[in-house]
Amino acid sequence: MQTAYELCRAIRSRQMTSEQAVTECLQNIRTLDSQVEAFLWVNEQGALAAARQVDKRIAGGEVVGPLAGLPIAVKDNICTNFGRTTCGSKILGNFESPYNAHVVDLLQQAGAVIVGKCNMDEFAMGSSTENSAFAKTRNPWDLGKVPGGSSGGSAAAVAARMVPVALGSDTGGSIRQPASFCGVTGIKPTYGRVSRFGLVAYGSSLDQIGPFATDARDAAMVLQAVAGHDLRDSTSVNEPAGDYLQELETLRLPLKVGIAAEYFGEGLDPQVKASVLQAIEVLKSKGAEIVEVHLPHLKYAVATYYIVATAEASSNLARYDGVHYGYRTKDPSDYIDMYCSSRQEGFGQEVKRRIMLGTFTLSSGYYDAYYLKALKVRSLIKQDFDTAFETCDVVVSPTAPGPAWSFGQMTNDPLAMYLADIYTISANLAGIPGISIPCGFSEAGLPIGMQLMGKHFAEGLLLQVAWAYQQATEWHKKQPQGISVTV
């Protein structure tokens, strides 16, 4: 499959049609998704109809959007007014949104064709996509391994080349970690850069939508289409987005790359460490200057995140009560039974665990001891990054402590799974952008990712650095063995 950039150029120049591109994607989904299970719903008829409409406009000489005819998939917590939006949960198993998320409107305005909705950990709570109520998405590089989470379906769909690009959401690493596990590029923008209107909330002060792609250029194309201010989202920032695609090759040197010892300590797989250090040498050879930075409060990031995120989840998920919409238990004895049983039967184990954690930290007598203290530590983590960026342009780290693990390996040890997000969580707490790009493989042939983080609204710089690295390496061009797609 061609890259998104190449597909858009080919469709616009009429070397191929959008209908041909979409048909190839649908064929790849039919061929591969029984193995990978990346999709919860495929918009076959709607996608073909939309593609024909794009082709008609191009043939008629009409002005079309920058993504005209491009097939794309979206994570199933992003509302669409077609198909279902389940969030991977039984409690929303039959929910049909009456409106589109802002990013869906923008994609359609740009001419993109949405081919389906991707699997995810229930309500984006998980790091492996094992918590979905409907399917367990498999890693295309090894079907016995997890694809990461919570946006595992979107990452796996791009890795298997079922679609050239996809949207995910990232609350504590849910774009970057699966991008690392699946060997693709994934960027979490600055909090407020992309509208959250129509994104089903998990942690409202942490959630952010971003793209998966095979390379930084494709990610830049999609991010440019969905970034910008939205009056319907009170947290959307009225800060003009750059021309990410046009500026991709304008990286200014010398680039100062910050390395924090806190990211290379205990618990890091030696193979991951070696790959990331080698990637840093590549950046150095491209003219980067390496500087040492310190993030002293990073060791508190996981504890802080799992207090703030679960508290917000407890509040956000209170709306699923068996009354307004969603799953309702059969034959309840009274109102209290309906409420309790609907939530008991509708939510999965991990979601219930996080609701209980969040409710506890917000309860009387514990609010100050846990939640308020976590907010203060969150401020200190942000200050650490502010200080670091006074001496460097980007901070480099591993994306995850190790490669993808086997199914079931972490399910009985939630704390171990929470620690898998140790390198990504801090960017969400600080609200800064982060991108994961492939930088190597383990001895078992599993992808390894490197994370780049920048100042608020420095997405353009991160994409430039990622693209410069990818111009010097071939990791992002590797495809899973045994997964064949239409060329």
Image (cartoon, rainbow, N blue to C red):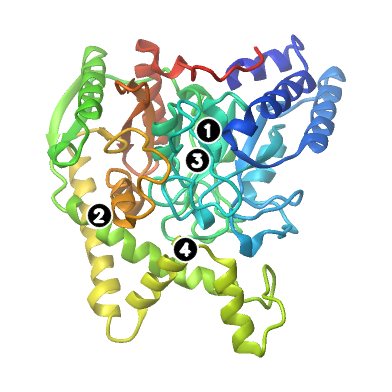
Asked whether disc 3 touches disc 1, contact meaning CB atoms under 8 Å apart, the reply is: yes
Q: Which amino acid does label 3 sit on?
A: Gly
310 sits left or right of 260 in the view: right
233 sits left or right of 322 in the view: left
Q: What residue type is labelled 2?
A: Ala
| Placement of the C terminus among the 4 image quadrants | top right
Say which residue appears at 72% left-offset and 59% top-offset: 94
119 sits left or right of 442 in the view: right
Circle 1 is placed at which residue position?
156
> In the image shown, does 445 or 262 lie closer to the viewer?
445
Residue 152: which numbered mark, if any?
3
Q: What residue type is labelled 4?
A: Gln
Residue 457: x, y in percent? 40, 41
Asked whether disc 4 touches disc 2, contact meaning CB atoms under 8 Å apart, the reply is: no
Gap between marks 4 and 2 measured at Cα: 24 Å
Rendered image quadrant of residue 110: top right
Say which residue appears at 14% left-offset and 30% top-offset: 291
Mark 1: secondary structure: helix
Say which residue appears at 76% left-offset and 49% top-offset: 82
Mark 3: secondary structure: helix
Of the two numbered discs 1 and 2 in the rendering, the one whose residue sits closer to the viewer: 1
